[in-house]
């Protein structure tokens, strides 16, 4: 499709073009209609066939100079509005504040002891949690199953659409669980023992279990031991069989199962943990559990290569034939940075897991890696999550630091798909307040960027692997551009697989995207993607009737009103339609 597309304009019911086969640029044709203040209904049909590989675009405008829309197609008043499903929180938000102010950045909360009760989960759902994350590093499968069931129940009974993400433990080196204590303080100069021994009768004082049997063999006297990427530091002073004696050099709070890395001569010692599998035997059991429980996303810790993702995806496909669990690659190791593009290409999304990433590369390198990962994901059309320490101080305090707010703003400004709370929501004292901060900072920054038109246009390379996909991609790119130029209120997309919705999201248009999809699982998956408002709706191949149905259902619920300008696209009919809500 190297040459200019042929453009013709016709009424949608007359196959005879008004202006035939003229090479008119999109924008010119459209601006003619945008001047018209009568109800507008404009369609661009792109048709391609095997015999005619050059698609022709037919533009229909049955609104110009007449109120043809109402005359021709009176909209049935459907009283049964229950056949459209949307997240109750989004619905309320749309009713109160209209299209423009809906939040585009999605929010994920890690669920832990501070947020696992039904009323706590509901408070997070009301506060805008789009995805609940459970971390298999902590708690039992029973505990996690209970959380999943509570979230499901909330969705069913109260109309939320919270998706579930299960995060694997991965087989990096972790501390044990501190013998039941919720934390332990390590003071400067104290001597602590890190041991691979199993202690039957409780942990001796200042002793930490290590989960990796090779630990005592691998470390050397003089190595630096970093807990949680440097939150606490030790120096190895002596090895006695399975025990490693260390002196605390940077005091701080030790948390159960915190990650451990060791450094020698200023660089990370990775030979040994490079030998550990990305997905441990425990992880495989957890993954089976996740598949059985029907989680929406599997986040894989310490991914090193695309191979492991492909392997896992084929496993999921064999185990859960009808399910479409998305696999999210967590970028948190040196290897994952090295193989970034192929890992992201193989995955359904990625997470910038800054906690462990900051333990593997110098901290000052994390921001540029974050920006790069966000950019690669956007180019490859994969959702991206920015995670860890966004509001770390809110684990203890009710207000964030200015620096934390600046960090959240930067992730929103980069237009990451989603932001994630970890300890802030899992075990912090102010989970709801932390979520409120993410929400209000997202809204404010998104608004500022739209108003000031500050977003730089990102070069979006073609990613389609077939000609049909390429048409979808062109349609979405054009629809998003038109939406910005015409300042429409919303883009509607009718999509069975969610693909067209994600292509639109990738363009990061100024208006929200209403994504109509037929299945609950696709709808929940779209929850992770920037700017999408997912609805479940049964629809047919007849776009005219789909639109009529949608308009009446949404109007009946007060979510749109007459005169709103929308652009609609679908993956059944390759067309772009522009119209006022009748
Ligand atoms: N299910 C849980 N049960 C108990 N504590 C939890 C649970 N989930 C999280 N936490 C607590 O919240 C903290 C932050 O959670 P987070 O998910 O970021 O884990 P993490 O240990 O930092 O590891 P990861 O690198 O996998 O994110 C944990 O260190 C732990 O103390
Ligand atoms: C989220 C996570 O795993 C990390 O930041 O390390
Ligand atoms: K994890
Ligand atoms: Mg991690």
Image (cartoon, rainbow, N blue to C red):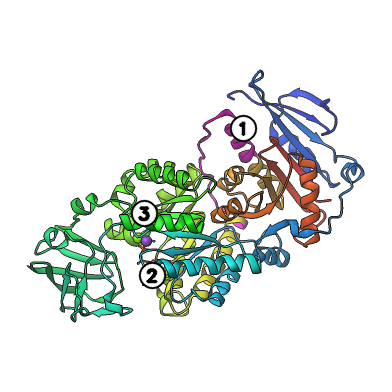
Q: Residues within 10 Å of mark 3 (few under 14, many from 20)?
A: some
Magenta run includes residue 466:
yes
- Write the start and end of the magenta stretch as one range: 451-478
- Return the residue at label 3: 284
Asked whether 309 or 144 is in front, the reply is: 144
Q: Position of residue 365 (x, y in %)?
A: 32, 55
CA distance for labels 1 and 2: 47 Å
Q: Are marks 3 and 1 in contact (CB under 8 Å)?
A: no
Q: Secondary structure under badge 2?
A: loop
Q: Residues within 10 Å of mark 1 (few under 14, many from 20)?
A: some
Residue 421 as seen in the image, left or right of residue 197: right
Image height of 289 relative to 118, above or below: above
CA distance for labels 2 and 3: 16 Å
State the residue at coordinates (66%, 41%).
479
Residue 498 as seen in the image, left or right of residue 410: right
- Return the residue at label 1: 471
Asked whether 4 or 383 is in front, the reply is: 383
State the residue at coordinates (82%, 34%).
12
Q: How many marks?
A: 3
- Return the residue at label 2: 139
Image height of 236 relative to 266, above or below: below
| Quarter location, residue 43 | top right
């Amino acid at each position: 499709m190297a040459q200019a597309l042929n453009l013709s304009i016709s009424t949608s019911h007359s196959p005879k073009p008004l202006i035939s086969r003229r090479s008119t640029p999109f924008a010119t044709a459209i601006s003619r209609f945008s001047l018209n203040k009568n109800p507008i209904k404009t369609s661009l049909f792109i048709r391609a066939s095997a015999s005619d590989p050059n698609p022709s675009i037919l533009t229909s405008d049955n609104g110009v100079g007449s109120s043809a829309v109402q005359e021709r197609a009176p909209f049935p008043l459907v009283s049964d509005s229950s056949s459209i499903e949307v997240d109750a929180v989004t619905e309320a938000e749309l009713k109160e504040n209209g299209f423009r102010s809906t939040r585009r950045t999605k929010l994920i909360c890690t669920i832990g002891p501070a947020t696992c009760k039904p009323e706590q989960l509901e408070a997070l759902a009301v506060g805008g949690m789009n995805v609940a994350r459970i971390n298999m590093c902590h708690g039992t499968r029973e505990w996690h199953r209970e959380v999943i069931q509570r979230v499901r129940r909330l969705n069913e009974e109260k109309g939320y659409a919270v998706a579930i993400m299960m995060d694997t433990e991965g087989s990096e080196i972790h501390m044990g669980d501190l013998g039941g204590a919720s934390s332990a303080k390590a003071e400067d100069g104290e001597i602590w023992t890190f041991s691979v021994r199993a202690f039957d009768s409780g942990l001796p004082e200042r002793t930490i279990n290590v989960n990796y049997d090779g630990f005592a063999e691998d470390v050397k006297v003089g190595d630096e031991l970093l807990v949680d990427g440097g939150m606490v530091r030790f120096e190895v002073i002596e090895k006695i069989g399975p025990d490693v004696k260390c002196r605390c050099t940077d005091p701080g709070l030790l948390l159960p199962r915190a990650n451990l890395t060791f450094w020698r001569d200023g660089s990370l010692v990775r030979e040994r943990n490079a030998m550990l599998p990305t997905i441990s035997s425990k992880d495989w059991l957890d993954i089976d559990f996740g598949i059985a429980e029907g989680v929406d996303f599997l986040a894989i810790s310490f991914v090193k290569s695309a191979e492991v993702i492909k392997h896992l995806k084929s496993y999921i496909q064999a185990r859960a034939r009808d399910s479409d669990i998305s696999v999210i690659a967590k970028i948190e190791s040196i290897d994952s940075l090295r193989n970034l593009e192929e890992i992201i290409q193989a995955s359904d999304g990625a997470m910038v897991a800054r906690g462990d990433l900051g333990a593997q590369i110098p901290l000052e390198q994390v921001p540029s890696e974050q920006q790069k990962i966000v950019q690669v994901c956007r180019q490859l059309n994969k959702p991206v999550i920015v995670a860890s320490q966004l509001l770390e101080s809110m684990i203890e305090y009710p207000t964030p630091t200015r620096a934390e707010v600046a960090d959240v703003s930067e992730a929103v400004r980069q237009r990451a798909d989603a932001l994630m709370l970890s300890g802030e929501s899992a075990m912090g004292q102010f989970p709801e307040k932390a979520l409120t901060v993410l929400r209000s900072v997202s809204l404010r920054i998104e608004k500022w960027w739209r108003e000031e038109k500050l977003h730089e246009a990102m070069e979006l390379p073609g990613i389609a692997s077939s000609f049909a996909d390429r048409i979808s991609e062109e349609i979405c790119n054009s629809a998003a551009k038109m939406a910005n130029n015409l300042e429409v209120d919303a883009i509607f997309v009718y999509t069975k697989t969610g693909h067209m919705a994600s292509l639109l999201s990738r363009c990061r248009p100024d208006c929200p995207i209403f994504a109509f999809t037929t299945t609950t699982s696709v709808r929940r998956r779209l929850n992770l993607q920037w700017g999408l408002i997912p609805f479940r709706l049964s629809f047919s191949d007849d776009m005219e009737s789909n639109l009529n149905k949608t308009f009446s259902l949404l109007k009946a619920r007060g979510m749109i009103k007459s005169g709103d300008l929308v652009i609609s696209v679908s993956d059944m009919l390759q067309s772009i339609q522009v119209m006022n809500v009748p």
